[in-house]
Image (cartoon, rainbow, N blue to C red):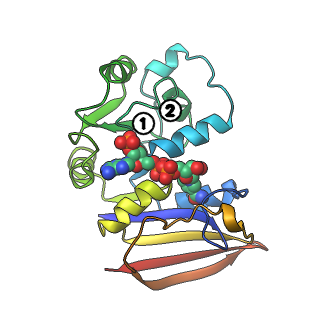
Amino acid sequence: MEIVLHNSISLDGSLTHFDIDMGQHYQIAGEYKADANLIGSNTIKTGVELYGEAPPEESNDFKKPERDKNLPNWVIIDTKGILQGLLHEVRRFEFCKDVIILISRETPEQYIKYLTERNYDYHVVGNKKVDIEKALDLLSEKYDVSSILVDTGSTLGNILLKKRLVTKISILVHPIIVGSKSHNMFRNIDANIKLKLLSSKTLGDNNILLVYEPIY
Ligand SMILES: NC(=O)c1ccc[n+]([C@@H]2O[C@H](COP(=O)([O-])OP(=O)(O)OC[C@H]3O[C@@H](n4cnc5c(N)ncnc54)[C@H](OP(=O)(O)O)[C@@H]3O)[C@@H](O)[C@H]2O)c1
């Protein structure tokens, strides 16, 4: 399975506390043409909250969208149901084929009811947390996924790296230093991971895209 971890960072490695060039971030993400995007629940929650209060649901929000079948599904891990009441905002996004939710045996019943009533595909893959390897097998078998773009925070990104599942790291470096506020992209990695540089290019006047392959 090809798994690309794509993030925008400051020069000093922070994922937050600066203005990300969202247009460029998502343009590059799209260029990987992955079969699915994998995203953590905190990333979705933070992103949705940026737009203020969620708009009320409409009848279309209860149906699967009819979109180009070549678009990626957005696969979100959300065992605690923190996205209850917010998922219609994600489903409305035009570049998302539909939303698939991965949950565990501990996921609250009322969240499962919420997902069922709105026709979201969901899968129980784990006891407490989502079993990542099982989730990847499921995506491959049920949705024919062979490439994944991971657009998430350090928590899920570092779990995938520690499990040696990431095959490419794609980093869009922004020309800014955030210093002591830095939320380092690799904050939970303990052992060094060697990298092979696959490409580097300057984008526009300011940003640099670095693509590496981890050598495990
Ligand atoms: N600069 C960038 O490129 C960029 C990109 C994306 C996000 N961000 C920023 O990153 C922040 C959010 O990142 P975050 O690190 O808080 O969270 P995150 O990576 O978005 O979410 C954590 C995810 O990891 C899952 N998880 C945690 N432990 C797990 C385990 N043991 N096994 C399997 N899954 C596990 C959680 O699932 P459950 O809790 O549901 O079990 C959750 O879905 C936000 O501030 C966002 O703006 C920046």
Could you tell me which residue is drawn at 49 percent across and 65 percent down? 187
Residue placed most toward the observer, 100 or 86: 86
Q: Give the x, y percent position of residue 155.
A: 44, 55
Residue placed most toward the observer, 181 or 116: 181
Label 2 sits on a secondary structure element that is helix
The quadrant the N terminus occupies is bottom left
Classify residue 7 as left or right of residue 165. right
Quick check: marks 2 and 1 in contact, CB under 8 Å?
yes
Q: Mark 2, residues whose alpha carbon is within 10 Å: few (<14), some, or many (≥20)?
A: many
Label 1 sits on a secondary structure element that is strand
- Whether 82 is drawn above or below 61: the answer is below
Image disc number at residue 91:
2
Q: Give the x, y percent position of residue 45.
A: 54, 38
Where, by quadrant of the figure, is residue 20 drawn?
Answer: bottom right
Residue placed most toward the observer, 201 or 108: 108
Where, by quadrant of the figure, is residue 94 drawn?
Answer: top right
